[in-house]
Amino acid sequence: MEKTKLCGAVILSVLSTFHPAQASDVSGPGQVRNTQTEMAYFLSSSIPEKDLATLIGAAESRHIPVYFRGLVNDSMEQTAQYMMHMVTTYHIQGIAIDPVRFEKYGVKQVPALVKKCGDTFDILYGNLSFNDAMKLMDTQGDCAKQPDGSQP
């Protein structure tokens, strides 16, 4: 039982301490406040470890929060072990687990980069470089077509 308590404390520390969303972003359990602008990167532990670390690092360098849909193998203990390994091995900050954001944007596969602007959002799937993805969104996405130019 002590191991489970420690495991829970570790995962809460990794996920809470480095959780990219602020308390003001969430209006209640399972509810995401309707923000005007947001960038979000959706990933999964199913991505090969080194590739995942590279993707998370790229998002973190741009201050873009990273989200997983749920726990690794539906286990808090396995998720804690996995994240501690990723944090200590690859020096990433961590991820947030947020199935509500996956549903809000209709994310069905990963990697997925979302850019929300006003009432619309752009989503790109696949392993594009952030520079290429941002260029596509800025020139061809729905956010680029906003009349008021509202972009994050």
Image (cartoon, grey):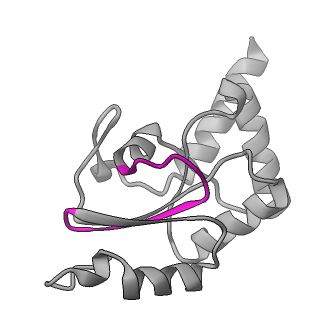
Q: Relative to 120, is 80 above or below?
A: above
Q: Residue furthest left?
A: 148
Residue 56 placement: quadrant: bottom right
Q: Relative to 47, is 11 above or below?
A: above
Q: Residue 104's spot in the image, x, y percent?
A: 35, 46
Residue 45 placement: quadrant: top right
Q: Is residue 73 left or right of residue 67?
A: right
Q: Which residues are magenta?
A: 105-119
Q: Residue 92's spot in the image, x, y percent?
A: 70, 62
Question: What is the quadrant of the C terminus in the image?
Answer: bottom left
Q: Residue at x 63, y 33 (%)?
A: 71
Residue sitting nearer the eye, 26 or 110: 110
Residue 91 visible (yes or no): no
Q: Is residue 107 left or right of residue 92?
A: left
Q: Residue at x 74, y 59 (%)?
A: 52
Residue 46 visible (yes or no): yes
Q: Residue furthest top?
A: 1
Residue sitting nearer the eye, 14 or 70: 70
Question: What is the quadrant of the N terminus in the image?
Answer: top right
Count of residue discs: 0
Q: Residue at x 65, y 27 (%)?
A: 8
Q: Is residue 19 left or right of residue 4?
A: left
Q: Residue furthest front?
A: 140
Q: Is residue 111 magenta?
A: yes
Q: Residue 145's spot in the image, x, y percent?
A: 25, 82
Q: Relative to 135, is 116 above or below?
A: above
Residue sitting nearer the eye, 75 or 91: 75
Q: Residue at x 38, y 51 (%)?
A: 105
Residue sitting nearer the eye, 146 or 8: 146
Q: Residue 70's spot in the image, x, y percent?
A: 57, 35
